[in-house]
Amino acid sequence: MGKYIRLFRLQDQYLAFSSVIAAGLFAGIRNWSIFWWAIGVVLLSISAFIVNEITDRNDTDRLSWNNIHIRKNDILDKRVVLLMFITCSLVGLALSWYVGFIWWAVVIYAIALSYSLEPIRLKRRFGLDLISQIVATWMLPFFAPLWGKANVNFIAAFSIISSLAILAGMFPYQIADTQADEKAGLANTHVVLGIDRSLVSGLVLAAAAGILYLVFNMYSWATFTIPIIIQLPILLVFYGIWISLSGRGAQQIVSLQRGVKVVKFLTQMGAIYLFVLWILF
């Protein structure tokens, strides 16, 4: 059973879930439509992760250091996997239809599946790997409940700043797998840039997010983001450490792999904080 549960990648669903909850907090929407939209998006995300796990186990995951993936020797019943995929997809789309966001869901679903499905497989394409991830897991789920209900300028500012911060947080997780991706023949953003330039890019993104956060006084009109944005200085310290280890090969990779666990834990706690805040206030 454990090998099938790993296909869900439950520990990685916090971003899709928190994007919808953030929209609820942003616009002061406290009704159940937000919750059901969040669950719908997560189910669609799970469907995409199932495809991702099945595809990646044939190349990059065989070389990955990360033990969250299904194991190389796991034997999966295709009928069970297909049933899981269809169930999550249909329920996710049904919930999206129920709350009135079906077309948003269809676009999210299409992009998310395209990330892993051949021959498109955006995961192996420079630039498109990052764009597809941030659009499908953060921007579109966030936009849907706010469309026509909130100030466009505030939505744009929030989306840009939060996307920069999220990408900066995602980079270490992806960079730690750069060697595996390269050996698997992928030509995604971090493989093309290389580890050192990717780290510098992540540092720039984190710094830009922090500066824009202050410039646009986001702390005054999106106060719920304050406990989350304070993670940026921690991320900047990590980036500084990783960049300082340039040229040290295995030592840099090991540091990245260890740091990723801390960064991921902080972002998961951020998702829990948003949900609790949405329920209470």
Image (cartoon, grey):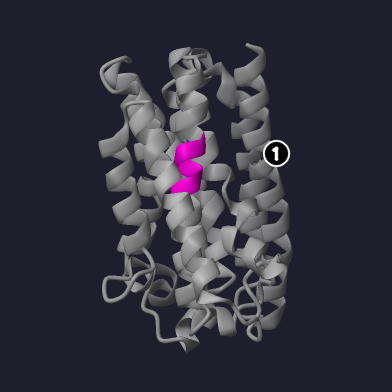
Secondary structure, mark 1, is helix
The spot of residue 198 in percent (x, y) is: 47, 65
Q: Which residue is mark 1?
A: 269
The vertical placement of 65 against 202, above or below, is below
Which residue shows up at 27% across the image and 71% down it?
Answer: 120
**What residue is rendered at 45% in x and 41% in y?**
41
Q: Is residue 233 above or below residue 27?
A: below
Residue 55: where, in percent of width, then height? 45, 76
The magenta-colored residue range is 39-44
Does the magenta run of residues contain 42? yes
Quadrant of the frame with the C terminus: top right
Q: Is residue 111 above or below residue 193?
A: above
Q: Is residue 96 above or below residue 199?
A: above
Residue 256 position in % (x across, y down): 66, 66
Q: Which corner quadrant holds the N terminus?
A: bottom right
Q: Residue at x 27, y 76 (%)?
A: 119
Left or right, 258 with respect to 86, comes to right
In the image, 207 versus 124, the foreground residue is: 124
- What percent of the width, then of the height, locates residue 192? 38, 75
Quarter of the figure with residue 101: top left
Residue at 36%, 63% in the rendered image: 115
